Image (cartoon, rainbow, N blue to C red):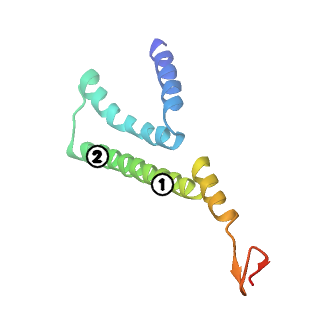
Amino acid sequence: MLVLFVYAIGWQQLIKRLPLTTAFANKAITVFWGLVWGVLFFQEDVTPLKVMGAGIVVAGVVLFSRADNEERRDFERAQDANNPPAGQQAEETSAGAHQPSVQGGEECGHAVR
């Protein structure tokens, strides 16, 4: 019963600190831990097929986590490009707001004589 309590607390701490997609992908690592605990506590045999299966699961988790991180970085870059910092946006707006236009020999609405 104590093991379940520790697991529940650990899981809650994990999902507080990681994005849900990453946290749930890492639940698949239990296949690896099951293999390790089976050998340590129950003297199970480790066969090449079991190791290969655990390796495929771990490789899938790594690939998924990397893809998720890349997607998050791309999203953040797009957000930064669309929303410049407030000071930068104000400078760009004020720089182009009151520039006089010269059209047809007139500057700022006054005729040139």
Q: Is residue 83 visible?
A: no
Q: Is residue 64 visible?
A: yes
Q: In 3D space, how far apart are the residues under numbered discs 2 and 1 (Cα atoms)?
A: 24 Å
In the rendered image, the vertical position of residue 26 relative to residue 73, given as above or below: above
The picture places residue 10, in percent across and down from the top left corner, at 47, 22
Q: Residue at x 39, y 50 (%)?
A: 66
Front residue of this view, candidates 100 and 12: 100
In the rendered image, the vertical position of residue 78 relative to residue 21, given as above or below: below
Circle 2 crowding by C-alpha within 10 Å: few under 14, some 14–19, many from 20? some
Residue 57 lies left or right of residue 47; in this view the side is right
Q: Residue at x 60, y 54 (%)?
A: 91
Q: Amino acid at mark 1?
A: Glu
The picture places residue 30, in percent across and down from the top left corner, at 39, 34
In the rendered image, the vertical position of residue 75 relative to residue 54, given as above or below: below
Q: Residue at x 54, y 58 (%)?
A: 81
* Element on which disc 2 rests: helix
Front residue of this view, candidates 52 and 12: 12
Front residue of this view, candidates 86 and 42: 86
Furthest-top residue in view?
A: 2
Mark number for residue 55? 2
In the rendered image, the vertical position of residue 2 relative to residue 94, given as above or below: above
Residue that badge 1 annotates: 71
Q: Residue at x 62, y 61 (%)?
A: 95
Mark number for residue 83? none
The picture places residue 67, in percent across and down from the top left corner, at 42, 54
Residue 52 lies left or right of residue 91; in this view the side is left
Q: Amino acid at mark 2?
A: Gly
Quarter holding the C terminus is: bottom right
Q: Nearer the viewer, mark 2 or mark 1?
A: 1
Circle 1 crowding by C-alpha within 10 Å: few under 14, some 14–19, many from 20? few
The picture places residue 33, in percent across and down from the top left corner, at 33, 32
